[in-house]
Image: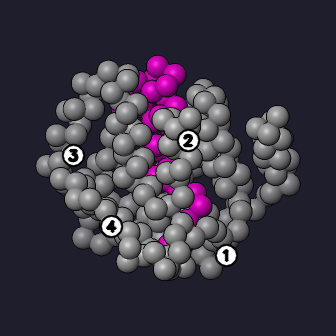
Amino acid sequence: QIYEAVIADINEAEKLINKESWEQKFSYRFTTLSVKALRARVYLYMGQWDNAYQAAEAILAEKNTLEDFNAETYTLPNNYQSVENITALERGMSSNYTQAAVLSDKNGYRFSQKSGKDDFRCSFRVGEMYLNSAEAAAQSDKLPQARTRLLELMQKRYTPEAYTVKATAVNAMTKEALIQEILDERARELAFEGHRWFDLRRTTRP
């Protein structure tokens, strides 16, 4: 009943919100794409894989540019000024904890900076939509589509050498292994952005 109420609210919001974009300083405000991003996330949490895949793909048809960590210059993807930003409302972590959060080293993976500063307010961004699409595709047996979306994201986040190794591994994975790899990539990509509790709750924590 709660999910039905949430979906009903999203349907109503879709009728009422008609603003496609705001000036960058107002990027915390919802747009038509924000509503679609919320729908994709909710369907993923519900385990409605076909709906989640279609919703994520609808967003990526409109906005799919990723920050390239291998470029000479790039904006961190969780920064409100990033090309990946869809909505920058929530602060994922308090500034009090910025120095207390430490990420483990991962071979060839280049982590985003995580911070409690207002620059890093982030509710929805393109990287999440790639992962939503990949997971929903894998869960509904669309393994080629799942691999494509996962590898498109990985190519922008790993060094070229590390990506080559990852691509070989991903292309050889079974469905179960691929889903686990996507979940692991979510943990890396979305660290400290407010997703982890929900991901653990819907996958491994009763």
Residue carrying label 2: 201
Residue carrying label 1: 26
Q: Can residue 80 be seen in this view?
A: no
First in sequence: mark 3 or mark 4? 4
> In which image quadrant can residue 180 be found?
top left
Q: Which of marks 1 and 4 is in front?
A: 4
Q: How far apart are marks 3 and 1 (CA)?
A: 35 Å
* Number of callouts: 4
Q: How far apart are marks 1 and 4 (CA)?
A: 30 Å
Write the start and end of the magenta stretch as one range. 120-149
Q: How crowded is mark 3: few (under 14 residues within 10 Å), some or many (20 or more)?
A: some
Q: Main secondary structure of the magenta part?
A: helix
Q: Where is residue 57 in the image (x, y as percent from the top left)?
A: 55, 39
Q: Which amino acid does label 1 sit on?
A: Phe
Q: Residues within 10 Å of mark 4 (few under 14, many from 20)?
A: few
First in sequence: mark 1 or mark 4? 1
- How are the colours assigned in the image? one colour
Q: State the residue at coordinates (82%, 51%).
A: 13
Q: Mark 4 and mark 3 in contact (Cβ < 8 Å)?
A: no
